Image (cartoon, grey):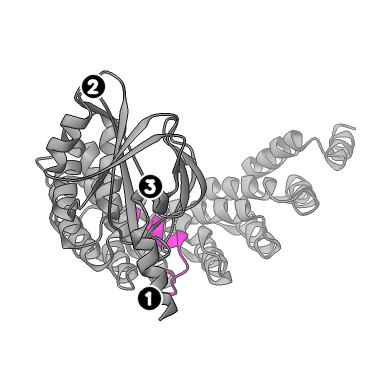
C-alpha cells in the first residue's frame, strides 16, 4: 500500500520536479503534434529547450548533474535498468533545432537560464519519426545525437527505424552509426538485422562495421556468428575483422577459430591477422599456439608474425622458441625476425641471448642482426661485448 501511495505521489508532482530541471523557466504543456510543437515553440529568436519523455531500453543512466547548454554531464551508457525513461531535449531558435541532448532519469539538469518547454504525452512513434528526420537531414553532430536517441527508445518501432537507417540508400556515415547501435542497444532484433547485413550488404565497409557491432552485442549467439564469419565469409576483409574481434573477447570458441584461420585461411593477410588475434587472447592457450606456429607453420610469413608477437608479449616462455628459430629455421628472413623479437624482450632476457647469437650463430646475416640490435639496446653488457669484439 505504501509503495502504491509513493508512486501516486511521484506521478502527481510537476514533470519538472520529477526530472529535477533547475536554473530555467520550466513550462509544461500537453503535446499535440510533436514535430509541429517543436517548430512553434522554437520559432522565437531567443533559444529555448523543448523536452519530452519516452520509454527507454534502460541503457542510458545518469548520475549527478548535467548541463544543457554545454552538454556536460556524468552520463554513462550501460546495460542497466535504473532508467526506464529517456528525457529528450531539443534546442531551437528561429524555427530550427540546433542541438539534441538526451539523458536517462536521475540527473539534475541545469537549463542554463533558458526556457524549457516540457511536453507531456509524446508517443514513441512520433518521437522516432521526429528523430529520424534529424538523423537523415541534419549535420553530423545532430545526426549522431538523433541516431543515439532512436537507439535508446523502447519497442519495435526503434528497431525498425534503425534498420531503415542501415539501408544501402542511406549515406554511408549514417549507416555506420545505425549499425553500431543495432549491436550496442537493440538486443535480439538488432542481432538479427546485423546477421542480414553481414550476409547480404553490398558494401564491404558496412559489413566490416557490422562485424564490430556483433562483437559489442550482448546476444549469446553473436560469438557464434563471429566464428562463422571468420571461417566462411567470402570477403577476406570481413574474415579478418571477425578474427580481430574474436581475439579481443574471451569466448572459448575463439581459440579454435583463430587457430584454424592462422593455418588454413586461403588469404595470407587473413592468416597474419589470425596470428595477431591469437596474441591478444588472455589465456595461455593463445601463447602456446603462437609458439607452435613459430615452429611449424608452413607459411614463412605466418611463422614470422608469430615470432614477432611472441617478442611483443615478452613472455619468458617465448625465449627458448625464439632462440630455436634464430638457430634452426630454414628461412634467413624468419631467423632475422626472431632476432628482432628477442631484441624486444626485457633486457635481462634479450641482451644475453643477442650476445650469444652474435658470437655463435652460423648465419652471418643473423650475427649482423644481433649486433645491430645490441647497438640499439644501450646496455652496458652490449658495450662490453663490442669492446671484446673490437679488440
**Position of 253 relative to 17 (above/below):** below
Residue most extreme to the left? 169
Which is more toward the observer, 344 or 1? 1
Q: Residue at x 31, y 24 (%)?
A: 47
Q: Quadrant of residue 198?
A: bottom left
Say which residue label 2 marks.
44
Q: Residues within 10 Å of mark 3 (few under 14, many from 20)?
A: some
Q: In the image, 68: left or right of 209?
A: right
Which is more toward the observer, 225 or 64? 64
Q: Residue at x 37, y 56 (%)?
A: 13
Residue 389 seen in the figure: yes
Say which residue label 3 marks.
16
Q: Residue at x 42, y 76 (%)?
A: 3
Residue most extreme to the bottom? 1
- Whether 136 is among the magenta residues is no
Q: Residues within 10 Å of mark 1 (few under 14, many from 20)?
A: few
- Of pointers 1 and 3, the one earlier in the residue sequence: 1
- Of pointers 1 and 2, the one earlier in the residue sequence: 1
* Marks 1 and 3, how far apart at CA: 21 Å
* Marks 1 and 2, how far apart at CA: 42 Å
Residue 236 seen in the figure: no
- Report the span colored magenta: 240-254
Pair 1/2: label in front: 1
Q: Position of residue 225 (x, y in %)?
A: 28, 67
- Of pointers 2 and 3, the one earlier in the residue sequence: 3
Say which residue label 1 marks.
4
Q: Position of residue 220 (x, y in %)?
A: 34, 73
Amino acid at each position: 500500500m505504501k509503495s502504491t501511495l509513493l508512486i501516486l505521489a511521484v506521478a502527481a508532482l510537476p514533470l519538472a520536479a520529477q526530472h529535477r530541471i533547475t536554473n530555467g523557466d520550466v513550462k509544461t504543456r500537453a503535446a499535440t503534434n510533436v514535430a509541429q510543437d517543436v517548430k512553434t515553440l522554437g520559432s522565437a529568436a531567443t533559444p529555448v529547450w523543448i523536452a519530452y519523455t519516452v520509454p527507454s531500453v534502460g541503457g542510458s543512466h545518469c548520475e549527478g548533474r548535467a548541463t544543457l547548454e554545454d552538454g556536460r554531464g556524468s552520463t554513462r551508457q550501460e546495460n542497466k535498468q535504473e532508467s526506464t525513461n529517456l528525457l529528450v531535449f531539443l534546442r531551437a531558435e528561429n524555427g530550427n533545432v540546433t542541438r539534441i541532448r538526451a539523458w536517462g532519469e536521475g540527473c539534475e539538469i541545469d537549463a542554463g537560464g533558458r526556457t524549457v518547454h516540457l511536453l507531456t504525452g509524446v508517443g514513441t512513434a512520433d518521437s522516432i519519426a521526429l528523430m529520424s528526420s534529424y538523423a537523415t537531414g541534419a549535420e553530423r553532430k545532430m545526426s549522431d545525437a538523433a541516431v543515439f536517441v532512436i537507439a535508446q527508445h523502447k519497442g519495435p518501432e526503434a528497431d525498425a527505424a534503425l534498420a531503415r537507417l542501415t539501408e544501402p540508400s542511406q549515406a554511408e556515415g549514417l549507416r555506420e552509426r545505425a549499425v553500431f547501435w543495432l549491436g550496442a542497444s537493440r538486443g535480439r532484433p538488432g542481432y538479427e538485422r546485423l546477421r542480414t547485413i553481414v550476409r547480404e550488404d553490398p558494401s564491404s565497409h558496412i559489413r566490416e562495421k557490422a562485424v564490430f557491432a556483433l562483437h559489442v552485442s550482448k546476444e549469446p549467439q553473436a560469438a557464434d556468428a563471429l566464428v562463422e564469419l571468420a571461417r566462411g565469409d567470402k570477403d577476406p576483409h570481413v574474415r579478418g575483422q571477425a578474427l580481430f574481434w574474436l581475439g579481443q573477447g574471451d569466448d572459448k570458441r575463439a581459440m579454435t577459430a583463430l587457430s584454424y584461420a592462422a593455418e588454413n585461411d586461403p588469404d595470407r593477410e587473413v592468416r597474419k591477422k589470425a596470428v595477431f588475434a591469437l596474441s591478444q587472447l588472455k589465456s595461455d592457450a593463445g601463447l602456446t599456439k603462437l609458439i607452435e606456429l613459430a615452429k611449424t607453420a608452413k607459411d614463412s610469413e605466418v611463422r614470422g608474425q608469430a615470432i614477432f608477437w611472441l617478442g611483443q608479449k615478452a613472455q619468458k616462455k617465448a625465449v627458448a622458441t625464439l632462440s630455436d628459430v634464430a638457430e634452426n629455421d630454414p628461412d634467413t628472413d624468419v631467423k632475422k625476425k626472431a632476432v628482432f623479437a628477442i631484441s624486444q624482450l626485457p633486457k635481462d632476457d634479450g641482451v644475453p641471448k643477442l650476445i650469444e647469437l652474435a658470437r655463435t650463430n652460423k648465419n652471418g646475416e643473423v650475427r649482423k642482426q644481433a649486433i645491430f640490435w645490441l647497438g640499439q639496446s644501450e646496455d652496458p653488457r652490449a658495450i662490453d661485448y663490442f669492446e671484446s669484439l673490437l679488440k
